[in-house]
Image: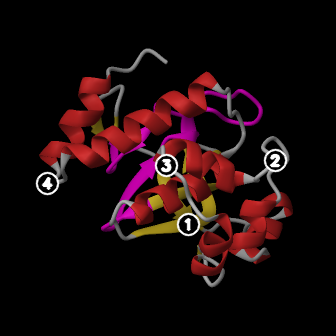
Amino acid sequence: MNYSFDTIEKIVLENGYDKNLSSILISFYKYIYNNQWSGACHAISSVLYVVLVENGYKPEICIGEVQKDNYIFDHSWIELDGKIIDIAISLTLDGTYISAPVILDINIEKKEKSKIKYGVNRKGIEGEAQLVSQCPFSLYMDMFPYNDKGLWGIVKELLNKEIDIQKMKIKYQDIKRKIYN
């Protein structure tokens, strides 16, 4: 985690968003690194989706194949106004370095447009990604094994306020992931 938080804020502000978005992304970035959430792109994207919606943004939660050079893998990310937000890309399951986090299409290490291709269609999502794509969103949020409240507990922690988890489950029960397949 050698990336400057100032870089994240600068990218966010240069793209016409407010400091609230940069604060959310920086807090989230710190959380996943401090808790070593490697290989957790589906969980990371799910939590970030809810946190963004609860702060008034209109993100899409996406799942599909991603490509860097000849390396293709199943992945989840967020799109906000058609731009990629992908903090999980830097914490892969097998430890392979793919990229620094991508904030609004920008690789925060290189400070340039990311060269990763999102939503490619090579062999289609499979395995865990296929299961996640078919799982009702609220149920997926419930099943996280490392918090007694599931991913909702992480949302509560990141929002830093009391939430009614039952109401959240109802609010998000019909959310569908944008599937690139």
State which mark lies toward you, 1 or 4. Answer: 4
Eye-nearest disc, 3 or 4: 3
Q: How is the image coloured?
A: secondary structure
Distance between the Cα atoms at labels 1 and 2? 26 Å
Residue range in magenta is: 79-106
Contact (Cβ within 8 Å) of mark 2 with mark 4: no
Vertical order, 150 against 113 (above or below): below
Q: Amino acid at mark 1?
A: Cys
Question: Which amino acid does the dot numbered 3 rest on?
Answer: Lys
- Where residue 132 sits in the image (x, y, percent)? 76, 66
Q: Magenta stretch containing residue 82, yes or no?
A: yes
Q: Earlier in the sequence, mark 3 or mark 4?
A: 4
Which residue carries the number 2 mark?
148
Q: Label 2 sits on what residue type?
A: Asp
The disc placed on residue 94 is: none
Q: Is residue 91 magenta?
A: yes
Q: CA distance from mark 1 to mark 4?
A: 22 Å
Is residue 114 in sight in this rendering?
Answer: no
